[in-house]
Image (tube, rainbow, N blue to C red):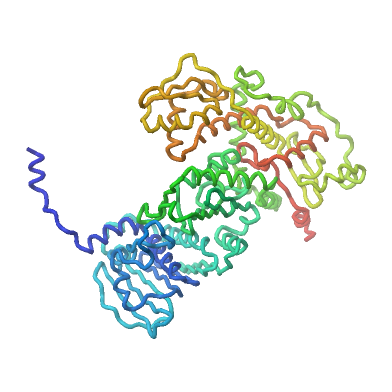
Amino acid sequence: MGRESAYSARMPIRQLSETMINQIAAGEVIERPASVVKELVENALDAGAARVEIVTAGGGLNLIRVTDDGSGIPEQELVLAIARHCTSKLTEDIHDIRSLGFRGEALPSIGSVARLSIRSRTANGDSAAEIGIEGGRVSAVKPAAANRGTTVEVRDLFFATPARLKFMKGERAESSAIGDVVKRIAIAFPAVRFTLAGSDRSTLELPAADDSPEGRLRRVAQVMGADFPDNSIAIDAMRDGVHLAGHVSIPSFSRANALQQYAYVNGRPVRDKLIAGAIRGAFADVLPRDRHAVTVLFLTLDPAIVDVNVHPAKADVRFRDPGLVRGLIVGGIREALSNAGIRAATTGAAGMMAAFRPGAASYAHSGPANGHRSYEAAYRASGAAGFDPSRSPQRPLDMEFANGGFGENGQAAFDAGPLHSADARAGQDDAAEALLGMALGAARAQVHENYIVAQTTDSLVIVDQHAAHERLVYEALKNALQSRAVPSQMLLLPEIVDLAEEDAERLAMHSETLARFGLAIERFGPGAVAVRETPSMLGETNVQQLVRDLADEIADNDTVDTLKERLDRIAATMACHGSVRSGRLLKPEEMNALLRQMEATPGSGTCNHGRPTYIELKLADIERLFGRR
């Protein structure tokens, strides 16, 4: 009875008005002023602009004006430009999208919720023309004065939908979001000059550069800071027709959030979950979970194998083969990190310089060094638990590497003898002289029973002996994992895990790969798998949760990285307990051997927790401290 009453009381089906349709579309396309700037700047770039100027007031709510020197809009097409689903950028093939915009929704959506005017002149036009739209009401086209290109002016954003204004943040927050959008787009178009001026009289100017790799890096430095190029590694990888290029930061140059991770697909700025996850996976064993790499990555691929028409805002994409893309990103970054050799962040030296200045109480390092105390506390807590890998009943790997050379045994105190100047000692020992040309130089002393002081031809190097050796042991453990199957332990009774049928099928398809990691599974009727063996390194583990996490990982990324990351974390814990401790005195030959192994080990610039293992202070910096420069 109630259902009948509800149906009898409903309104009749009717066609929505054009204004209402546009306002509904605006709710998806125009989220905030930054969304308007994004759409208008993309239109300017699609028109071939070499110069784009943006002016805002009131955080973009009072005014947004975007002026470009692009091809312009012919007078007879201005009416179509503000009509819904009209565009010059799309052919008959929806899968062949090569422009930033293509849906034909932005301008009518903006005009339905704001006061919009468009003034444009083509290269061949004798004069300009202008059209306006206010809250959905279109005014007639009229003559205007303008140079070649287009000026779009948006005033009183959301005046026609005042409820939306309640969801806007303050002027400063909206202005910051606009700046982020402009910077994000500008990185992909280094040959275009961008200027952004706000009501607070601040101006962002990004001069044009060339479109070469060097020009792109200059534009990246304009946006992300001059420190980034010196602390980054170039990426260039190709797999099955998908090309990955760009730069990523060295592990010791990281941030507390992922805001400085920029990704582009065929030149389009995107915020993609798969790409973000791949970046995290690539840096998983060189950065702690609360630190994030700084990245600028460009993916170039056939438009037919990526769907950019997922959401009206066009920030999300879907790849036909997500596993290929994720594997390319993870593999490309890890290979670049491995080939880069040992490098310390330049900000480490800057922190040391700042600490030496008079009155400098502390220095906020840009890397993870701020978390030193928390890492040490975690380490002490783990040590209190009494974990000893050499006595573990599930000891899967040969720990000779960890217990030999720099291990606890045989590390007796030594008498360094009378102190001599570094130059005098170098002259006495030809071997030490040769070491000065190495990346980490020759060991000169150990201070506070934890820090190795070394000298190169042009710098002073300070090494955290525990952090450095921890990384060396960890890499050795990982290599052992990769060189042979992970040892497994058989369960007394198979564990049956009930899953959705599609999840069970995915796990069965990856069963051979999972077996290499010590996890033996097989189908057990519809919608279930039986687990017969688990990795020894995991010890007693929640098998149900492990399998479900793996199913989710495969569904999202078509990989089994979850299990690999768990094993890597166990290896990291073992490395921490199998490494030379702080407070142990090292002989000179031991210190030099540690430096040589660091130079030969990928990723040794940071420990397993993401802290820097060494800091390098150039001779020029030291001379500045003493007023010699």
Q: Where is residue 162 in the image (x, y as percent from the top left)?
A: 27, 60
* Image quarter of residue 137: bottom left
Decide which of 401, 356 is in the foreground and name it: 401
Q: Position of residue 248 (x, y in %)?
A: 59, 51
Question: In percent of the image, x 77 and y 61: which residue is there?
Answer: 629
* Image quarter of residue 389: top right
Q: Does residue 217 appear left or right of residue 534 in this picture? A: right
User: Vertical placement of 436 versus 42: above or below?
Assistant: above
Decide which of 182, 217 is in the foreground and name it: 217
Quadrant in which the N terminus is drawn? top left
Q: Residue furthest bottom?
A: 126
Decide which of 521, 402 is in the foreground and name it: 521
Q: Position of residue 43 (x, y in %)?
A: 41, 67
User: Vertical placement of 184 versus 524: above or below?
Assistant: below
Q: Does residue 365 appear left or right of residue 106 in this picture? A: right
Q: Can residue 549 be seen in this view?
A: no
* Image quarter of residue 118: bottom left
Q: Where is residue 418 in the image (x, y as percent from the top left)?
A: 89, 37
Question: In percent of the image, x 80 and y 33: which residue is there?
Answer: 590
Q: Does residue 240 appear left or right of residue 621 in this picture? A: left
Q: Which residue lies furthest to the right in this view?
A: 428
Q: Is residue 277 visible?
A: yes
Question: In percent of the image, x 62 and y 43: which residue is there?
Answer: 369
User: Vertical placement of 525 versus 43: above or below?
Assistant: above
Q: Residue furthest top?
A: 492
